Image: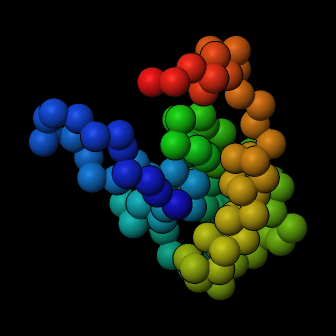
Amino acid sequence: MGVRPPPSNSDGGPDVIEFGIAEVAAELDGGDLSFPATGDEVVQALSNPRIKYDADGHTVPLAEAVAEVERDRFDDQQEFLNALHPVFERYRNSRTPGVIERVRAALPL
């Protein structure tokens, strides 16, 4: 998953903010790991990074997300990402906005 950041006057920022399985995929591309692998092997190979699960930057340790997946072994990277997708969707949809976020959303800006 990814979204475009809000427009700004500078051209030095990122084109896309990665979160969820897009961020996990980027971690996997930079890691030293081969499949088939278990979820624990993936977490260990990537040193259990904190993964953003929404565009606001809220994070969860990869080990915690992997623990919620219903299977343990993955034949390839895509299978691993597909298994994680519903976990990150649940995190994104279940998170309650904080007071500041609710006030900001209520004000016309």
Task: Name the residue nearer the viewer: 23 or 73.
Answer: 23
Q: How many marks?
A: 0
Vertical order, 43 against 59 (above or below): below
Q: In the depicted view, which residue is nearer to us: 2 or 71?
A: 2
Q: Position of residue 60 (x, y in %)?
A: 65, 39
Q: How is the image coloured?
A: rainbow
Is the C terminus in the top left, top right, bottom left or bottom right quadrant? top left
x, y percent for residue 16:
34, 53
**Which quadrant of the view contains residue 8?**
top left
- Residue 40 found in image quarter: bottom right
> Outermost residue toward the front?
108
The furthest residue to the right = 70
> Quarter-wise, where is residue 13 in the image?
top left
Front position in the image: 52 or 79: 52
Q: Is residue 16 above or below residue 59?
A: below
Residue occupying the point 57% across, 79% down: 78
Would you place residue 88 above or below residue 29 in this image?
Answer: above
- Asked if residue 8 lies left or right of residue 23, the reply is left
The residue sitting at 53% across, 35% down in the picture is 56
Q: Could one spot residue 1 in this view of the protein?
A: yes
Q: Return the residue found at the far bottom.
A: 75
Q: Position of residue 23 (x, y in %)?
A: 48, 55
**Is 1 left, or right, of 86 in this rendering?**
left
Residue 104 appearing in the image: no
Tell me: residue 88, above or below residue 47: below
* Residue 105 coordinates in the image, percent (x, y): 60, 27
- The residue at the point 52 percent across, 43 percent down is 55
